[in-house]
Image: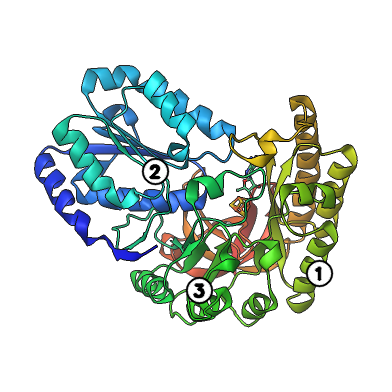
Amino acid sequence: MEILEFEEENEYIEKVKKINKEKKRKYYILTMGCMLNENDSEKICGMIEQMGYEKTENQLEADLIVFNTCCVRENAEDKLFGKLGELKKYKKETGCIIAIGGCMMQEKHIQEKLYKSYPYFDIIFGTHTINKFPEDLYNAISKNEKVKDILDIDGNIYEGIPIKREDKIRASVTIMYGCNNFCTYCIVPYVRGRERSRNPEDIIKEIESLAKEGYKEITLLGQNVNSYDGGNGYKFSNLLNDVDKIQGIERIRFISPHPKDFKDDVIEAIKNSKKICKILHLPLQSGSTNVLKKMNRKYTKESYLELAEKIKKEIPEVVFSTDIIVGFPGETEEDFEDTLDVVRKIKFEQIFMFIYSRRVGTPADKMENQIPENIKHERFDKLKELADRQTVENNVKYIGAKQKIIVEGKSKTNEKMLTGRTETNKVVVFEGEDKLINKTIEVEIFKDHVWYLEGRVV
Ligand code: 5AD
Ligand code: SF4
C-alpha cells in the first residue's frame, strides 16, 4: 500500500470540464449505508463539481447520476435495483451517464447481475478506485463505452481529493480504510480490504484546515478506529490527543471502536479531553457469549459489561450507544434474552438495531440453523420496544438540565425554531434568533419528546 497524492487525475478533471463548458450540466447522487460511504460521496461530489456539474436533488433532470452503494444488508441492494429500474426510460430518452460505485460493486455476483439485468449503466467503480472517477467519467463520455474500474486488491490511500462537504459545522474525517476483523456476518472485510491507516500528519492537517473554515465538530471514521496505526508506535490515543489540541474544534467523536481493542490509553485520552464527546459508540452486536463466539467478536457478555463498567468508573459522565443484530444463525431465545439483559443493564443512549441479513461469501451465510424471518422480526420488535421505552425514560432525565449545544440551523418542521445537538447527540429544538446559528450556546431543557427535546436559551 502506498500513500499517494491525487494530482494525476487533474488532467481528466480538466478534460471533462472542457467538454461541459457552458453546458450547465447537473448531477444527482444517492448515497447508501454508513458514514464512511457518505465521506466517500463527499469526495466524489468534490471531483464532480470541479468538472463543471451542479448538484440537483431531482434525478430526472440530471446529466450524471451516481449511486454510491452499500452491501452490509440486503435492503440496500434492493434499493439500488429499484432505483435502476426507475431510470431505464429516462436513460433511454436522455442518454444521461449512470455511474454505480461503492461496496456492492466489489461483489462479483452483483457485477454479473448488473451486466445481465441492467445493462444500461455506464460506469461501475469499486471502493478502491474512487480517486479515478474523473478518468472513468471521461472515458465513458468520450469513448461512449462501458467502464468497469474495480480492483480486487486493496487500493492505495489518496490524499488531496477535492471534497464537497454537506455540513458547515460538522465534518467527518476518515482516518483508516478496511477491516481485519472478519466478524462472520459481515461483508465489509471482503469489499473494503485490509486495514490501512492514513498518516497522522495528513489527518491533523485536514482537521486544522476544517477548523479554519469554521467547523466545530469532527467525527473520526474507520471500521475499527482503535486499531489505527500511524506508524512508529503512534496509536489511536495519540491521534485523539493531537486532535484535541486543534484550536477551534469543540467536539470530537469517533466511530466505530471495537470492544476487543478498547484499551486503557484510549480511555485515558477520553478522560483527559474536554472535547471528546462523552457518548461512546460501543458495538455490542449480541449480548450472548455463545453468539458472540460464533460471530468471531472475541469478547464475551461479561467482558463487554466489564469494559463498560471500567469506562464508567474512569469517566462517570459517559453514556453509550451501540449496534445490535438480532436473529444471527443459531440464536436461541436464551441468547436473545442475554442481549435484552445487556440492554437493560447498560441503558444505551441510542441503539442501532439490525435484523441479521445473509451475505454471500461470509461464514455466517453457510451456518446451519438460520433463524426464520418471523422469529427475527418478533425479536426485533421486542428489542425495539425495550429500546424505545428506555429512550423515553432517558429523555425525562434531561428535563431541567442545562445542555451545551452547537446550533445547526432552522428546524425543518418549524421555520421559527432553531435546532442543535447536545454532546450526547440529542436534537434540541428551541426558539432563538438566526444569529445563533453556528454558535455554541447553553439551553435549559423543559420538555421531552421521543426523538427530540425542547429547550430555551439561558
Ligand atoms: N446483517 C445485519 N446487520 C449487519 N451489520 C453488519 N453486517 C450485518 C449483517 N449481515 C451491522 C452491524 C454493524 C453495522 C454497521 O451493521 O451491527 O455494526
Ligand atoms: Fe464488519 Fe466486524 Fe469489521 Fe465492523 S469490525 S466492519 S462488523 S468485520
**Residue highlighted by disc 3:** 250
Left or right of residue 51, residue 69 in this image: right
Q: Which image quarter: residue 368?
A: top right
**Mark 1 sits on what residue?**
309
Q: Report which residue position mark 2 lands on.
A: 126
- Label 3 Cα crowd, 10 Å radius (few <14 / some 14-19 / many 20+): some
Please identify the quadrant where the C terminus is shown. Answer: bottom right
Q: Is residue 301 above or below residue 120?
A: below
Q: CA distance from mark 3 to mark 2?
A: 35 Å
Kind of element beneath mark 2: loop
Crowd rating for badge 1 (residues with CA inside 10 Å; few <14, some 14–19, many 20+): some
Question: In the displayed structure, does residue 127 sit left or right of residue 318?
Answer: left
Say whether residue 356 is visible: no
**Is residue 456 positioned above or below 187 on the image?**
below
In the image, residue 396 sits, relative to residue 457, either above or below, namely above
Ligand 1 neighbours mark 1 (CB distance < 8 Å): no
Residue 324 image offset from top left, x and y in percent:
71, 47
Residue 267 at what x, y percent from top left? 68, 76
Looking at marks 3 and 1 on the same chain, the residue that comes earlier in the sequence is marked by 3
In depth, the one of 231 and 377 nearer the eye is 231
Quarter residue 21 falls in: top left
Sequence-wise first label, 2 or 1: 2
Residue found at the far right of this picture:
334
Q: Nearer the viewer, residue 387 or 455?
A: 387
Identified by mark 1, the residue type is: Glu
Disc 3 marks a residue whose amino acid type is Glu
Q: Secondary structure at mark 3?
A: loop
Q: Amino acid at mark 2?
A: Gly
